[in-house]
Image: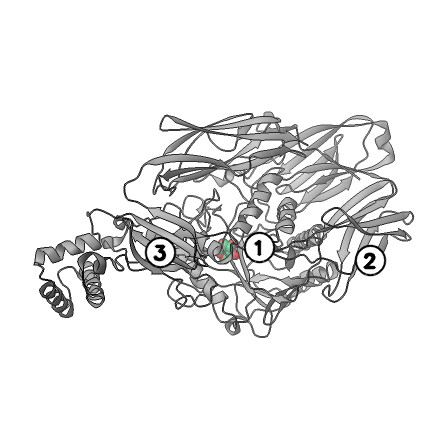
Amino acid sequence: MEKISLNFDWQFSYNGLTKNVHLPHPGVELPISNFNIDDLLKQFTYEKTIEFVDEDMNKHLSLRFEGIHHIACVYFNDELIHVHRGGYTPFEFEIKPIVGQNKLKVLVDSRENPSIPPFGGIVDYLGYAGIYREVYLIKRPKNHIINIHVKYENTLENDDVKFQIKTNATKGVLNASIYDQDENMVLCNDEIVTDYETEIQFHIPNKKLWAIESPYLYTLKLEYEGATYFERFGFRDAVFKNDGFYLNGKKTKIMGLNRHQSYPYVGNAMPKGAQREDADLLKSLGLNMVRTAHYPQSTHFLNRCDEIGLLVFTEIPGWQHIGDEEWQAESLKNLESMIVRDRNHPSVVLWGVRINESNDHHDFYQKTNDLARRLDPMRQTGGVRNMQHSEFLEDVYTYNDFYHEGNNRGLLRKKQVIKDAPYLVSEYNGHMYPTKTYDDEPKRIEHAKRHLNVLNQMKDPNNKLSGSIGWCFSDYQTHNEFGSGDGICHHGVLDIYRNHKIASYVYMAEGSKEVVMHVSSNLIMGDYPKGNLNEVYVFTNVDYIKLYRNAKYVKTFYPSKNKYKYLKHPPIIIDDFIGELIEKNEGFSVKDSEIAKKILKDVQKYGTKMPLKTKLRVLYILRKYKLTMDQGVSLFYKYLSNWGSKQSDYRFDGYINDHFVKSVTKSMYRTFDYELIPTRKVLNIGDTYDSTRVVIKKVDQNSEIAPYAFDPVEIYVENLELVGPKLQSLNNGLLAFWVKTINPGTGKIVVKINDKFYETEVEVYES
Ligand code: GAL
């Protein structure tokens, strides 16, 4: 089988203008915020000529479109040959070309047609536009394989695997071989095709399992009638039970986030490289699951999830609204297409067969469940709802639990939502506390604490909960009925540029294998009401932190197990910035230095209106250490900085197994510089252009991000295309943009900030 890219050089026409474009293509580029949604709701034409030679005429030829928003009418040599409705599923059909040049034209209707999911009601995400995924010409012999379904059961006890192979012919010899991850052949077999469906069975003893920590992949190679086909797969046993989720027999708490597939400016139109970077980013947050809210996402994304061990809960397009019978029929087609496309991915462990947060609909959901079970008996079904005890036709009760409001329980008890069923929380937080990267520090920390509270509750080993998937990975553009008035739902633990909010470190601390030590505060009291900055949360997986103030040791702090008892890595809360300093510097006894600390805290809290008990303590200390009132007051300024007083420098040294692993310094007096960091330095032009994310940071001398920096940035690229405008601004010290490849060679990225230039290079290859 030959899969030929048709992604380069389409003639794109809109509004009387025609230009040359490559796929994925967004149809329309939207500003990052404050845009007009009507700009997306357009119709476009994409045209291309494809050349065929004599020998192609002996082949079966088809066109495969991975995804078009939302209705595509495909014309081949001026004849309408295929119509596809639905913006999230692939479609493929046979063509009968002539030798020489053939005309391909696709009329794309990106309007939100109420007769196809997800439209018809209001939707909290944008539908976007264009031929936003790749297009291929597929050449196969006349007799060929149509699809391959990898099947196994009880893989922990049973070493059999079956490949169900659909062909368009009833004869021929199928040669099948299995390769391990190092490309060594494990087994091979010949089978005679006697029907349109042939099943080949292999026995693989001592096979390696696909797991979160070690995602082992095998490849099936099939040779049939002169063509070769490859299918990657993995062995894993994934089952949601009444008391939790089990992966390969091991109870595993799911810690995930929901992902929308949109990117700044280009909406959903991003190629392989950028899709894979998102999967890597999710994994780097220490997560073990992603939910593809609320539609099937790019195959490139799923492939990467397979490779890095990130579980996937994927679902059909929709948002609260269920349409009429025609609409439901489209939804069933979406479900079939999603399952047929994605069922060989070991990372996919659950099918979402309900429209996200829709009401019960017995007949429709009976059909979706039946269809999913017929197409894939290996996987369980879920269906995301926001109702407790709604009709349960699925295998797993997947529920959006927005109960947490900051001071109450993190999650509802399982029995309040559903009894005696496997249970997974599919969303929490989100709109309950929208938070921008440029909100003030107390708000961003509160956002992080809410994620922390839910995670802590989720991790209770006795709660019979499979886990939870938070809302959400990154901020996303949305319809006017949602968001902050700027067209953005600021619900992510990352912002729309995939830059970290504080909340992201809650996940990293709990799940990452790297050393994580994020001091959530800049220790600048002026950012706090009344200057009251009493405690600092450090999101970390270190064992303890030694705090130094102006280079003098203060105290050692440990994870706050009492407050967050279910977390593996509770935050370390720094709530004493004086520690043993008074004792050491002023010669106070240990007991008296504790009394002095209490006095200072009360002064900070009550000012001169302190309680009588505190006043008596003041008298006691002044008398015992022969201090005047002025000397006493100066202690306050020395140890508890106040509004307008000189701030101290703080150094946090983290230790694991008594070995120093990381240091963070927060200083008041700072010098600044900028860093320019591409996610990947090596890019590849393959089936289409490549794209990578580039971050700009304004950092101080300690590599800490400069707070509330909104510096204007001019971006220049050479041998690359910039996604978005040339002139942008930092958002709270950070910005990211994407670049796309044009030609092989060196690509240059230069940014100009405050008349200084910063530059970096990427190498672009062609394969
Ligand atoms: C849910 C919905 C999500 C998103 C979220 C915001 O109700 O399923 O798509 O809108 O709320 O918190």
Judging depth in this view, the residue of 307 and 726 nearest the camera is 307
Task: Point out residue 708 in the picture as x, y percentages from the top left corner.
Answer: 34, 42
Q: Give the mark toward the camera: 3 or 1.
A: 3
Q: Single out the mark in the foreground, 2 or 3.
A: 3
User: Mark 2 highlights which residue?
Assistant: 202
Image location (x, y in percent) of residue 94? 79, 39
Asked whether 102 or 719 is in front, the reply is 719
Q: Please tell me the numbered disc located at residue 291.
A: 1
SS at badge 3: strand
Circles 3 and 1 in contact, beta carbons < 8 Å: no
Q: Amino acid at mark 1?
A: Arg
Vertical placement of residue 116 versus 575, above or below:
above
Q: Which mark is residue 546?
A: 3
Task: Measuring from the top left, give residue 431's x and y in whole percent.
Answer: 44, 55
Crowd class of label 3 (few under 14; some 14 to 19; many from 20; radius 10 Å): some
Sequence-wise, which precedes: disc 2 or disc 3?
Answer: 2
Examine the image and state in which quarter residue 703 appears: top left
Which sits earlier in the primary sequence, circle 3 or circle 1?
A: 1
Q: Residues within 10 Å of mark 2 (few under 14, many from 20)?
A: some
**Element type where label 2 sits in the image:** strand
Q: Residues within 10 Å of mark 1 (few under 14, many from 20)?
A: many
Q: Residue at x 59, y 43 (%)?
A: 275
Q: Residue at x 76, y 55 (%)?
A: 150
- On screen, residue 23 above or below 299: above
